[in-house]
Structures are given as C-alpha cells and as structure tokens.
Image: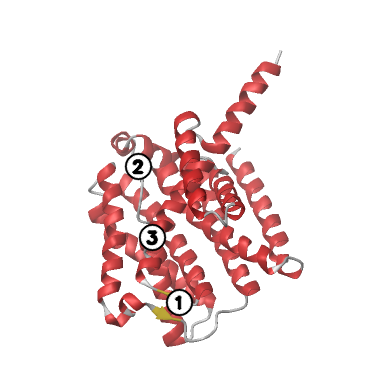
Amino acid sequence: MRLHRLSGDMGILAGAFVLLWFAPSFASDYALQISFRVMIYLTLAESWNLLTGSVGLVSLGTASFVGLGSYVAFGLANHFGAPIPVILVVCALAGAVLAALVSPALFRLRGVYFTVGTLALAALLQLLMVNLPTFGGASGIFLKHDPPPLASLYHDALSVALVASLAMAICARTRISVIIRAVRDDEDAAAQMGVRPYRVKLAAFALASALIAMAGAVQAINLGAIEPYGAFGLQWTIDALSMVIIGGIGWRLGPLAGVLFVVMLGEMLANYPEAHIAITGVILIVLIRFAPGGIVGMFARLFTRSTRLSSP
C-alpha cells in the first residue's frame, strides 16, 4: 500500500514538475516572481514540517541554514565562479555538516530547551557574520556578476522544491515514516524496540538543513546582495512556522496549502503590510484554538464526517 501511494506521489510530482517547467514560456514576470517565492517557501515549509510534524523537533533555527546557504553561495560565486548546480550541491553539504556539528549539543536538550537552542544558533551565526570583516560585516556582500535571468532562477527554485517534495514523499510513504513517528511519540520506547533515536533525529535534521540551505542559496542569488540581518533574520523562521501551522502540521499537503494561502494573502494585502501581519496573526490564533490540524486537517475532518453521515 505504501509503495502504491509513493508511486502515486512520484507521478503527481513528475507531472507537476514538467508542467511548471515550461511556465516561463507563457507566464508573465509577475507570475514567475510569485511562483519563485512559492517554491522557496515550499522548500522551507516542507523541511520544517519534517522536523516538527514528523520527528517532533520544534526548531526555530530555519534562519541559521537560510543564512548559511546565502553566504556559501556568494563565496562560491564570487571567488570561484561556480555554476548554480555546483553551488546548490555544496550548500546542501554545508547545511548537513553544520547540522551534524551542532546536533551533539542540541539533541541533549528536549522540548522547549531544544527550541531555544536552535534559536540561539541563528543569533550566534548572525552575530558572527556581523563581526567578521571577511564576510562583509554588517554591510554584507554583493554578487560580483549580475544574477541569472528570472526564468533560470525560477527553474532553480522549482528544482529545489521538487527535491524537497520528493524527500518528504519518501519519508511519508515508506517504512521510514513508521520509524520517524516512533521517535516522535516516545524516544525511550522506540529505543527499546531497536530504533536509534539519535541517528533518526540526526538524519532528519541534516536532510531538512540541507534543503533549507539550498533554498537560501537560490534566494540570495536572486537578490544579488546579502547582509547578516536579512540572511539570518527571524522572519524566515516565522514564515516557515506560520505556513505549516496554517496548512496543517504533520499533513502531507499541509506545507503546500499553507504556502499558497499565505502568499496569496500577502499579495492581496501588499499595500497594507500592517494589516497583513495582523490578519495572519489572527488566523494563526483561530486555527490553533479551533482547528489545530490547519486547513488540510479541517477539510479532512469535514470530509470524514460527511462520509460517515452519508453512509447507510
């Protein structure tokens, strides 16, 4: 059954990828910009949903790996002239390596202490970049060459989002999902059953960090300039968190639903940024109170209820 669902997911993702790949040939620049943002946010949301919804690691360190990917990408582009595919691979490795290096300390913490620890990591990296002239200090770094065309960057963001979605589909539709949920529900019980919680959490943390670093690299190249306060800004973490909560934590389609909802709301309220923040906050509070499963969970519950009522 799981393999059947995985093959179905793979088919849907492949079809969507092929269709979206040719979007630059008929879509406007505005549509491509919105689609680019959706792809970047989808990668961040998928990664955060893996850590929190599947493994139970409530991380506030998304900005750490967005910033890491940004700075690694600029270093490779400015000093070595590396092409974007090489930049993405190296950024993914950098994200996974940083996750592996900080894991021994972070995984000693549980619950809210782990959450605070990941938040402190982002603050530490931001402070480090501000005080090191080698990385441009507080002024940041500019890309020496012009960024690639929008269509090319759109394809890069689409490819990263596809990798993230494929990884999440594998984690959700294979035996891996059982192991992950066991660690999330009770680490001690999972360990007694032969599962190694530390390795499971490390693998998930490294995978999510690698994906986030790639998204940060593409976003930074699109901007053409980076600085510590933006690259390591808390807003990246808040955006990923709010999108997953709105879409539905732990649900396979939760990140996509949340990203589409938040991006569309942001475009409708583009001229009213204060109202956008306030409305998003109210929506979060309402959903957490009355529909903790988010948009996807709410519709799934309504569908289940209607099916029961219609059954004889």
Q: Which residue is the site of mark 2?
A: 195
Front-most of residues 29 and 179: 29
Q: Residue at x 47, y 42 (%)?
A: 245
Q: Which residue is the site of mark 1?
A: 225
Q: Residue at x 40, y 80 (%)?
A: 141
Quadrant assignment for the C terminus: top right
Dot 1, how many residues are within 10 Å of its Cα: few (below 14), some (14-19), or many (20+)?
Answer: some
Q: Secondary structure at mark 2?
A: loop
Q: Which mark is residue 63?
A: 3
* In the rendered image, the vertical position of residue 44 relative to residue 149, given as above or below: above
- Mark toward the viewer: 3 or 2: 3
Q: Position of residue 46 (x, y in %)?
A: 50, 51
- Mark toward the viewer: 1 or 3: 1
Front-most of residues 272 and 222: 272
Q: Evaluate whether residue 175 shows in this view.
A: no
Give the residue type that dot 1 points to: Ala
- Residue 112, quarter of the rendered image: top left
Q: CA distance from mark 1 to mark 3?
A: 16 Å
Q: Reading the chain from its start, which is encountered first: label 3 or label 2? A: 3
Give the residue type that dot 2 points to: Val
Q: CA distance from mark 3 to mark 2?
A: 30 Å
